[in-house]
Amino acid sequence: MRRFLLLILALLTLPGMAVAQARPFTSDRIVVTVQGSGPDVILIPGLASTGEVWRRTADRLDDGHRVHIVSVRGFGDVPSGANTNGALVAPVASELRRYIAETRLDRPALIGHSMGGLVALRAAADAGRDRRGGTVGRVMVVDATPFFPSLISPGATVGDVEPIARIAYQALLFLGDEALRMQGSALGDQLGGASDSVFSAVGWQGGDRQVLAQGLYEVMTTDLRSRLPDITAPVTVVYGWSADDRSPRSQLDGLFQAGYRNLPRPARFERIEGAEHMVMIDQPGRFLAAVTRFLG
């Protein structure tokens, strides 16, 4: 019997045995690629964008950080998987937390753009409420707010916006993103002038029509303001800004600050002059400087 046990032990410790190797993370909602080494940073793209929008940022960070670049299934050319059914933001946030837990990341920093900012906030709020999951170290939200319509009408509610969001959902679902983009100026009035942000020429990479429609609907109707008190991690908010008082972006300071007032600790705000919605692409130098301060 003793010889038999020793034989089993020897087999289990042979190089290449599956039991001695970590199982790779797989998900039917997100795809994650990793580069570099050091403290962990997770980059989450926005609506209709893949991880490619973070390429320049990731390549600058990977000298001193281990960078985890997320792509949401159904955006761009990434197969849609389970994202074709039901909700998007909450399940993707849940998968992100599972990734953090299963890969044993140590208090990673989350950087999320647009819809990715909603995902980051949701993941941080869930982590703050349930400490058994992966713990989030800090959060940077890029040109996103807990309730997007509040940037257009501070008193707006989900009930006010939902009928308009439903129109946008149906239009994208049945017309497709290219047709909807062509109607952007007309639909822009109904979207509160937000069509330029939604259909950014650089960031909008298309994808599965059902996933895009659901994502657009949730960007317009997700309200996380009541979840902000659950976030224990420090939050930094970065957004595009203009000194030209004729630009709507010159009026964003107070609107962003009001949107995050329910955080248990005050957020840090960094405006990037000369940037529109795709901050990291519009002003890469200034954005990277803000990220360096965030991670420092």
Image (cartoon, rainbow, N blue to C red):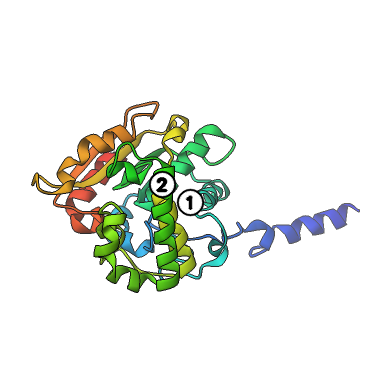
The amino acid sitting under disc 1 is: Val
Q: Is residue 99 left or right of residue 270?
A: right
Q: Which residue is mark 2?
A: 118
Secondary element at image label 2: helix
Callout 1 crowding tier (Cα within 10 Å): few <14, some 14–19, many ≥20: many
Left or right: residue 109 compared with residue 280: right
Task: Kindly identify the residue that appears in the image at 50 percent across and 33 percent down.
Answer: 128
State the image coordinates of residue 225 (x, y, percent, origin top left).
Answer: 41, 36
Which numbered marker is on residue 89?
1
Residue 260 appears in the picture as rendered: yes
Q: Are marks 1 and 2 in contact (CB under 8 Å)?
A: yes
User: Residue flagged by tag 2: what amino acid is it?
Assistant: Leu
Where does the image place residue 22, in percent across and percent down from the top left? Answer: 60, 56
Q: Nearer the viewer, residue 164 or 244?
A: 164
Disc 2 crowd rating (10 Å Cα; few below 14, some 14-19, many 20+) is many
In three-dimensional space, the C-alpha distance between marks 1 and 2, rounded to whole angstroms, equals 7 Å
- Residue plotted at (44% across, 29% down): 229
- 144 vs 192, nearest the viewer: 192
Q: Nearer the viewer, residue 42 or 171?
A: 171
Quarter of the rendering occupied by the C terminus: top left
125 over 37 or under it: above or below? above
- Seen from the viewer's position, the closer of residues 257 and 284 is 257
Q: Kindly indicate the quadrant of the structure image that contains residue 10.
A: bottom right
Residue at the (27%, 65%) spot, across then down: 184
Q: Quadrant of residue 292?
A: top left
Compared to residue 57, the image places residue 222 above or below, namely: above
Identity of the residue drawn at 27% across and 33% down: 257
x and y, in percent, of residue 156 in the image: 35, 40
Q: Is residue 257 above or below residue 215?
A: above
Task: In the rendered view, tell whether residue 145 sits above or below residue 198.
Answer: above
